[in-house]
Amino acid sequence: MKSLILTLLAVLPFMGLPAQTPSSPDKKITVSGSSVQYEGQSVLTVNNFKTLKFKFGKTVNESYEMLSGKKSKCTNSGKEFLAEIDKNTELILRIYNNGIAFRYRYHGLKDGSEIPAEKTSYTIKEGTKRWFQQWCESYEGFFPLSTTAKEDPVPSFSGLNKSKDGFNCRWAYPALLEPQKDCFVLLSEADIKAYNSASSLWNDNDLETFEVRPDKNETKISGDFFTPWRVAIIGRLSDIVESTLITDLSAPTKYEDVSWIKTGVVSWIYWAYNHGSNDYEIIKKYVDLAVLLKLPYVLIDAEWDEMKDGKSITDAVNYANENGIKPLIWYNSSVGWIDGAPGPKFRLNKPEDREKEFSWCEKIGVAGVKIDFFSGDNNKNMAYCIELLESAAKHHLTVNFHGATIPRGWQRTYPNLLSTEGVYGAEWYNNVPTFTDKAACHNATLPFTRNVIGPMDYTPCAFSDSQHPHITSKAHELALTVVFESGLQHIADRPESLLAQPNDVKKFFGELPAAWDETKLVAGYPGEYAVIARRKGDVWYVGGINGKDESLSVSLDLSFIKDFKEIKAFFDATDGNWKIQKPKTLPTKADMQQRGGFVLVIH
């Protein structure tokens, strides 16, 4: 009842209140006409705000906890304003100290109404620094630094999304801007419901006008309809990286018992053995690896339904459980890539089949499912993902979405969603040579773009090579496990490579958390370098990566770490091996080799 009252208060028009200039609690962010300003400088133009008159609605102030993510105890604190657009439409605006969010409420709709067309657009001037990704169904692309929207489309991803001038005209979230020096804006969205579709940015009508266009949605509605929140995280780079705004804006979970949901590090077969999950002996190798490294999980990937030599998935699951390792197994969603794709297929699409399959998983001791190959951002996919999450939760299964859209806050509403791909990750060393030269720069961009909005199953850390070599250093690869956040952190490398590392490195994997109590950006700039500190309990992990093809010395301010008993430092030696030290004081700088990195573990 309390929740219902708060919801009703949030959407009342407050007709008797005077119009106000909306501002954040700390007054740093204001909205004046179509201009969103940060510390007095215009940083974003929201064209649909231009003629609106906002009235104060309420103060938003709540605390909540997350089982996974960059922060365990979160605060949703801001101010809400309302503007009437017409008799059936109002805009709800929230302003926080680190950004703004707005959504539309359509009300009084007749039965069978079509969803009204959204009118949101942003003006992004040519010359503005940006890190944008061309849209594709799987969100597996780069975020190159640019100052123009005149980008040729990537044929394999965006060949159909061309403007009349022949340039790419569809852009994915999150989209990072630097409209003023040292001030950044990250555009995304949050709180997708089963009746929504996700959106993307289109500038096919005007080069500098980026329209928010929801994907296909044929849902017929009546009464009230809410769009997802359109989100702009605003501030210094630390405000962007440390923000929890996406989950702040998302619905709290309705699950009372979440004790069965466990984050953790995973041994993963596919990177080294693309078809290894149909081989019981290879699966055993990765279970044994998890035992030796003290990892909680093993992932049995595609083609487990074609197990060779008379073995079955039940045999593999039993072997994992007998050795104290929680098994995760893979499924084809059967809505994206189907023809020519691996199986198992068509086991989750119908509710009755899904119930049967997840019940069987729970019965034989499967801990979670990785579901792959979705077909974009339309309402069909959004509703299907939510059905999968709800059904999996009934059977105490964690979920990892692959070949899927990016997180938009579901990790709060459905805490069994521990990771999502939606990233150009280490798997691409299997596919094309492109990643070899671009990986370091790309890795140093992701902490400021994709990983800001939610867990990212990049599958980090490989000291050996897959089909195509990597040229990032050993310490760079190790640091990715700290710099990148994911509730299920899949380690990519093959067993013999991991087990050949020094004992300190092997011990590191067994102690590595996959959920954090606190996250801080220590230093960095997109595409150049990133140093991120994450705390679990009384242990700080500091990971640094160099995205450049030249060595780099970085100043470190770790003064927020007040007391410590021990420091273990992992750096690159000049001969390409490890330099592992136990310094007595907190370092004030870090020297990184070209495409190198470092890790500090501070107890």
Image (cartoon, rainbow, N blue to C red):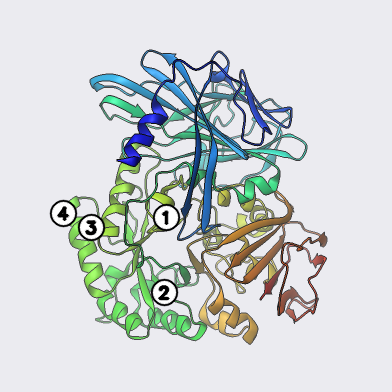
Q: Which residue is mark 1?
A: 402
The 10 Å Cα crowd at callout 2, few under 14, some 14 to 19, many 20 or more, is many
Q: CA distance from mark 1 to mark 4?
A: 23 Å
Mark closest to the chain's N terminus, 3 or 2 = 2
**SS at mark 3 in the image:** loop
**SS at mark 4 in the image:** helix
The 10 Å Cα crowd at callout 1, few under 14, some 14 to 19, many 20 or more, is many
Position in image of residue 542 (x %, y %) = 68, 66
Residue located at (21% from left, 68% from top): 360
Q: What amino acid does circle 2 point to?
A: Val
Q: Is residue 111 above or below residue 422?
A: above
Q: What amino acid does circle 3 point to?
A: Arg
The 10 Å Cα crowd at callout 4, few under 14, some 14 to 19, many 20 or more, is few
The 10 Å Cα crowd at callout 3, few under 14, some 14 to 19, many 20 or more, is some
Q: What amino acid does circle 1 point to?
A: His
Image quadrant occupied by the N terminus = top left
Q: Which residue is mark 3?
A: 347
Q: Which residue is mark 4?
A: 352
Q: CA distance from mark 1 to mark 3?
A: 16 Å
- The residue mark sitting in front, 4 or 3, is 4
Mark closest to the chain's N terminus, 1 or 3 = 3
Q: Which residue is mark 2?
A: 298
357 sits to left or right of 282: left
